[in-house]
Amino acid sequence: MIHLETMLVFVGVATALAVVPGPDNIFVLTQSAVHGRIAGLIITLGIALGLFVHTTAVALGVAVIFKTSQYAFSTLKYAGAAYLLYLAWQAFTASQGDFEGDKSKSETAPKQFLRGFTLCIANPKITIFFLAFLPQFVVPGNGSVIAQFYQLGALMVCVTLVVFGAIAIAAGALGTWIKGSIKSQIWLNRISGIVFVSLAVKLATAEK
């Protein structure tokens, strides 16, 4: 088990990192503004659970492959960039009806969750970051190393849910106002598209 003091330090650092603007929280911000806070919270859940994939990769040593293999790293990062470009295309071609919220939650929630989850797991830099970050808080003498990795991963998920959830709720208020303005809807979609293209370029040109 990880000691309480170590957990508190980890949560503090993780919170600071979650607040720093990055692909995930910017994605939550724009999607919450376009589709509302519920969509943002669902996307946040997808991103948070995606962190468990990266935690597992580190715990089982898979992250070493991405760190040492340029081919594996490039394959995943280009796949992630392609997905972001797909989201950009959807944003640029979205119609006014996409803001009306007439789709049932059963139809939209899984897609929103998948967007967040896919965006998270398609970024190999998170795995490499976890590989460098998590071991600093793992002490072999405190029990199973794998169990400690998952404890840290769970804490990271909790921090992400709180920080990104707050972003989703705040940005969702903007979305309520936007639904009453056609011009705002069009421009926010364009801005979202530009953000996705920028994130795709950033990911595609990322180095290990």
Image: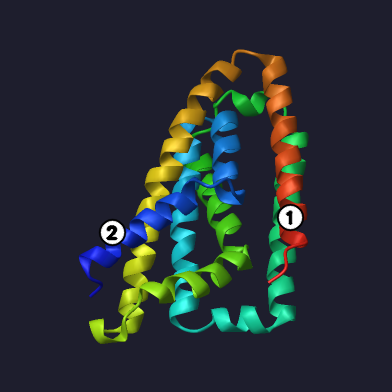
Residue 163 vs 96, above or below: the answer is below
From the image, state whether disc 1 or disc 2 is nearer to you. 2
Sort mark 1 into few (<14), some (14-19) or many (20+) by Cα contacts within 10 Å.
some
Instruction: Answer whether residue 90 is visible to the viewer in this image.
Output: no
- Element type where label 1 sits in the image: helix
Toward the viewer: 200 or 83? 200
Q: How is the image coloured?
A: rainbow
Sort mark 2 into few (<14), some (14-19) or many (20+) by Cα contacts within 10 Å.
few
Amino acid type of the residue tagged 1 in the rendering: Lys
Residue 177 vs 62, above or below: the answer is above
Q: Which mark is residue 171?
A: none
Toward the viewer: 157 or 7? 7
Image-quadrant location for residue 182 = top right
Image-quadrant location for residue 150 = bottom left
Residue 128 vs 186, above or below: the answer is below
Amino acid type of the residue tagged 2 in the rendering: Leu
User: Left or right: 6 with respect to 124?
Assistant: left
Q: Which mark is residue 202?
A: 1
- Screen quadrant of the N terminus: bottom left
Image point 70% across, 31% down: which residue?
189
- Screen quadrant of the C terminus: bottom right
Image-quadrant location for residue 164 = top left
Q: CA distance from mark 1 to mark 2?
A: 32 Å
Q: Could you tell me residue 80's position as x and y percent?
A: 68, 60
Image point 50% across, 69% down: which residue?
130
Q: Could you tell me residue 67's position as x and y percent?
A: 63, 79
Image point 62% across, 63% down: which residue?
122
Question: Residue beneath label 2, please?
Answer: 8
- Element type where label 2 sits in the image: helix
Q: Earlier in the sequence, mark 1 or mark 2?
A: 2
